[in-house]
């Protein structure tokens, strides 16, 4: 079992998109048994993979408005409709339970509708887990996820972990889960000064953690949200010079429309049934191929 963690201490760069598409690509194209782990209390990966709430389609919006107009038109009825259609539904167990009691991992795993792809979901309860782990209410707080995953290591070829955008005990659990030579940390960085600042912070934290925890993972930088202009090309070239062999050949371009459409309609851009012809879908497919080439020897 190979663990890949996707992290950058900066929000909104596409970590969740990458965790989702990589998992679907490795499960679909390469028939690998994949477990997605959602370590972000926002639960965006969970919502994308499990389709727990209804998509924000025109049809659903019209249905909500119609039901609102037929009712008493109060704030509480508006909230009830939002909850019914667009707020996550309950899952029996989630990552918060696994971090508290690693032996619950098998109960917490949920099948997705993609063959070979399962997920441990996250809900807002993870915010509490972070506080409990930090205040050392629990023993070995950084090793909870590692212990849990050990129990399913024969059942999966890949574990792909999505992370929150800041340093916390959840992120440390994800980094410690990448303890072996074959494991990989992917750092998606947006090509702007905020992205480079995030790279600086994340790399410093990763190096410190790897030294302290005697972890042996490799890390790779993935340029994302790239615009294809001279400035961005030069910045990417600078990264190749500064971090030789550490920058993936794949780049993910900025292309909002197809990503938004896929997200609203709940499909994956690398899913072969949808056969998306957009440039960003090609970028994501290339990333899946590159990661597969990097990792296949280790399985
Ligand atoms: N390459 C891209 N081009 C255009 N839009 C993108 C791209 N990648 C992601 N997005 C959009 O940007 C937003 C943030 O993406 P995503 O949620 O994957 O980022 P994130 O790093 O996981 O954010 P957070 O730190 O909040 O968890 C989403 O609306 C997503 O659809
Ligand atoms: Mg995210």
Image (cartoon, grey):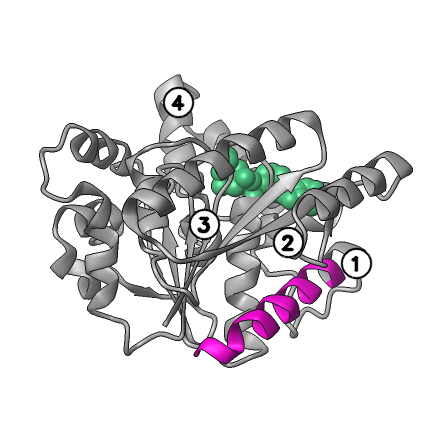
Residue 256 seen from this side? no
Mark found first going from the N terminus, 2 or 3: 3
- Tag nearer the camera, 2 or 1: 1
Q: Nearer the viewer, residue 249 or 44?
A: 249
Location of residue 106 with respect to 85 vertically, above or below: below
Mark found first going from the N terminus, 2 or 4: 4
Number of callouts: 4
- x 79%, y 58%: residue: 278
Q: Quadrant of the C terminus?
A: bottom left
Q: Mark 3 — residue?
A: 45
Q: Mark 2 — residue?
A: 262
Mark found first going from the N terminus, 2 or 1: 2
- x 39%, y 58%: residue: 216
Q: Secondary structure at mark 2?
A: helix
Residue 78 seen from this side? yes
As for residue 265 lying within the magenta part, the answer is no
**Image spot of residue 160 (x, y percent):** 43, 59
Q: Secondary structure at mark 4?
A: loop
Query: What secondary structure characterizes most of the magenta part?
Result: helix
**Image spot of residue 1 (x, y percent):** 36, 72
Q: Secondary structure at mark 1?
A: loop
Q: CA distance from mark 1 to mark 3?
A: 22 Å
């Amino acid at each position: 079992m190979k663990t890949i963690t996707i992290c950058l201490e900066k929000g909104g760069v596409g970590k969740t998109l990458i965790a989702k598409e990589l998992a679907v690509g490795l499960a679909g194209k390469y028939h690998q048994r994949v477990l997605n782990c959602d370590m972000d209390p926002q639960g965006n990966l969970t919502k994308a993979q499990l389709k727990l709430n209804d998509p924000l389609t025109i049809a659903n919006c019209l249905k909500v408005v119609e039901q609102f107009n037929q009712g008493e038109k109060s704030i509480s009825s508006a909230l009830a409709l939002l909850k019914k259609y667009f707020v996550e539904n309950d899952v029996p167990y989630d990552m918060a339970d696994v971090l508290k009691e690693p032996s619950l991992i098998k109960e917490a795993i949920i099948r997705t509708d993609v063959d070979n792809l399962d997920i441990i979901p996250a809900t807002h309860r993870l915010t509490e887990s972070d506080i409990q782990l930090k205040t050392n209410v629990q023993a070995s707080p950084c090793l909870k996820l590692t212990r849990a995953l050990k129990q399913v290591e024969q059942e999966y070829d890949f574990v792909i972990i999505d992370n929150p955008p800041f340093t916390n005990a959840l992120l440390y659990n994800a980094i410690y889960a990448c303890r072996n030579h074959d494991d990989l940390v992917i750092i998606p960085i947006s090509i702007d000064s905020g992205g480079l600042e995030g790279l600086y912070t994340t790399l410093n934290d990763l190096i410190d953690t790897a030294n302290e925890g005697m972890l042996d993972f490799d890390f790779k930088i993935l340029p994302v949200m790239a615009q294809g202009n001279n400035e961005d090309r030069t910045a990417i070239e600078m990264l190749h010079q500064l971090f030789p062999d550490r920058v993936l050949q794949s780049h993910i371009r900025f292309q909002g429309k197809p990503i938004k459409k896929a997200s609203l309609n709940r499909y994956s851009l690398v899913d072969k049934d949808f056969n998306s012809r957009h440039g960003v879908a090609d970028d994501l497919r290339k990333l899946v191929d590159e990661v597969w080439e990097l990792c296949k020897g280790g399985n």
